[in-house]
Amino acid sequence: MNTITNEKKAAKLLDARGIAQIGILSAIAAVLMVIEIPLWFAPSFYKIDLSELPVLIGGFAMGPFAGVVIELVKVLLYLLIHGSSTGGVGDIANFIIGCSFVIPSTLIYRYHKSKKSALIGMAVGTLTLIAAGSLLNAFVLLPFYANVFHMPLDALVAMGHTVNPSINDLPTFVMLAVAPFNLLKGLLVSAVTMLVYKHVSPILHNKMGRR
C-alpha cells in the first residue's frame, strides 16, 4: 500500500498542475531571493532573504522531493537573471544550505501531518541549517571569497570585528555572525510559514471549493 501511495504522489507531482505549482513557487522564491535585508550583527555581505518560504510551503504541500526541485529551480532562475559572481560556488552552497533546512522540515511533517510535527520539523530544519551554513562558510565560502577578492581571510574577519568586537578569528566569526544569521533566517521563514500555510495549502491541494 505504501508503495502504491508513493507512486501516486510521484505521479501527481509530475502532472501538469504539479509542474505549474513548482514553477510558480520557484519564480516567487527567485524574486524573494533578490530582496535582501542587511543585518546589524554581521558584515554587509551577509543579507537575509525569505526565498526559502515558497520552497518550504511547496515541500509541506507536495513533499520533500518537490521542495528540493523548487530550491534547485529557484537557484537556476536567479543565475539566469543575475548571473554569478562566484563561479557558481556560492549558488551551489545556497542550494545545499537551503536543502538542509527544507528536507528535514518536510520529511518530519510528511509522516505525521500536524501543527506540532510542522513545528518540530522546522526546529530540526533550523538546527541543520545552522550546522550546514556554519560548516560551508568556514571551510568553503569564506576561504573562497577571500581568494576571489584577493584578500586574506583575516580581512573578512576584521570586517566582522568592526560590527562585533567579539569577533576576532574564524571560529568567532562563524559563531557570532554566520550561526545567528542562519538562526534568524530559520526562525523568520518558520514563523511566516506558520502564518500563511493554512491559507495557501487549499490552493496547492485544489480544495478551494471545499473549504
Image (cartoon, grey):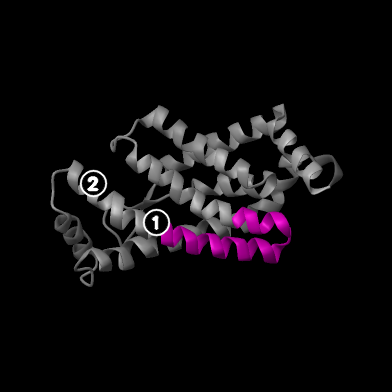
Q: Is residue 164 left or right of residue 8?
A: left
Q: Is residue 71 above or below residue 163?
A: above
Is residue 200 at all visible to an observer of this figure? no
Q: Is residue 160 left or right of residue 102?
A: left
Q: Is residue 129 above or below residue 93?
A: below
Q: Amino acid at mark 1?
A: Gly
Does dot 1 land on a helix, a strand or a loop?
A: helix
The residue at which mark 2 appears reads as 145
Q: Main secondary structure of the magenta part?
A: helix
Residue 128 on the magenta segment? yes
Relative image position of residue 36 (x, y in whole percent): 39, 47
Nearest to the observer: residue 29 or residue 85:
85
Does dot 2 land on a helix, a strand or a loop?
A: helix
- Res. 121 image quadrant: bottom right
Query: Tag count in the figure?
Result: 2
Q: Amino acid at mark 2?
A: Tyr
Query: Considering only order in the chain, which callout, 2 or 1, is on the residue closer to the N terminus?
Result: 1
Q: Is residue 192 above or below residue 70?
A: below
Q: Is residue 4 left or right of residue 61?
A: right
Relative image position of residue 156 (x, y in whole percent): 19, 55
Relative image position of residue 10 (x, y in whole percent): 71, 37
Label 2 Cα crowd, 10 Å radius (few <14 / some 14-19 / many 20+): some
The residue at which mark 1 appears reads as 133
**Highlighted magenta segment, given as a residue range:** 105-133
- Going 54% across and 38% down the picture, which residue do you hit? 28
Nearest to the observer: residue 208 or residue 130:
130
